[in-house]
Amino acid sequence: MQPRPDSDPDFEAEDWDHASVEFPSSQEGRREFLAGWLTPDHWNPVPVPRPRIVANLGDLSWPERSSEAICFTLLSVEHWLSRSGFLREWLRLNLWLAVILTLSVVLLVPPVTALLEGAAEWSSLGGSVVENIHAAVIKLPPIVLAIASVLLAAALLQRHWNQRRRGGRFREDQYEGYR
C-alpha cells in the first residue's frame, strides 16, 4: 500500500506518478553526513600521478634497481586502485583519526581507571566499617543493649515532658515580632 502524497479528497490514485518519487540513496545520505563535519582542510583528495620508470635504471646497482622496481610496483597498484586519490585521502584521514583516538585513550584511560579503582577501594573500606560496627553491636550482650535502650527512652521522655511543661512546641512569644 502506497501512502498518498496529500490529503486532497479529489485526488485519484491513478493521477499519482510513481516514477517521479525519488528516494535518497544511502550513499547520498552518507556523503551529506560527511560533508557536515569534513572541511577541505580534512578532506582534499589529489589525483595520483601515473608512475614512471627512472630513465637511468640500467646504470643503477642491483639493490637500487630492486628498490626502484618495488617502488614502481607499489605506485602502480596505488594508481590502479584509486586514480582520483580517494583511497590515499581516506587512509590519511583514518590514520589521523586513529592517532587522535589513540592519544586520547592513552591520556584518559589511566586517570579514569585510577579514579574508579579508588572509588571501589573506598566503597570496600566503607563496607568493612559498616560490617565491623554491625559485628560489634551483635557481639554486645543483650543486657547492654537493653540498658542503652532504656536510657535512650528515658532521655526522649524527659525531653517530651520538659516541652509539655513549657507549653508545647508552639509559643506565642516566639512570634511576636512578626505581626
Image (cartoon, helix red, strand yellow):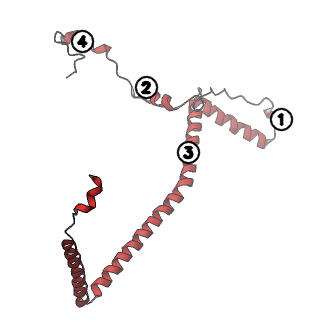
Q: Quadrant of residue 79?
A: top right
Label annotation for residue 28: 2
Q: Amino acid at mark 1?
A: Asp
Which residue appears at 37% of the width and 23% of the height? 24
Q: Quadrant of residue 130?
A: bottom left
Q: Is residue 36 left or right of residue 139?
A: right
Q: Is residue 107 left or right of residue 66?
A: left
Pointer 1: what residue?
Answer: 59
Q: CA distance from mark 4 to mark 1?
A: 74 Å
Residue occupying the far right of the picture: 59
Q: Quadrant of residue 149?
A: bottom left
Closer to the chain start, of discs 4 and 2, is 4
Q: CA distance from mark 1 to mark 2?
A: 52 Å
Q: CA distance from mark 2 to mark 3?
A: 25 Å
Q: Nearer the viewer, mark 4 or mark 1?
A: 4
In the depicted structure, whether residue 84 falls above or below residue 134: above
Pointer 3: what residue?
Answer: 98
In the depicted structure, whether residue 150 falls above or below residue 22: below
Q: Residues within 10 Å of mark 1 (few under 14, many from 20)?
A: few
Residue 41 locus on image (x, y percent): 60, 31
Label annotation for residue 16: 4
Residue occupying the far left of the picture: 9
Q: CA distance from mark 4 to mark 3?
A: 50 Å
Q: Residues within 10 Å of mark 4 (few under 14, many from 20)?
A: few
Q: CA distance from mark 4 to mark 2?
A: 25 Å
Q: Amino acid at mark 4?
A: Trp
Residue 17 locus on image (x, y percent): 27, 12
Q: Amino acid at mark 3?
A: Ala
Q: CA distance from mark 3 to mark 1?
A: 42 Å
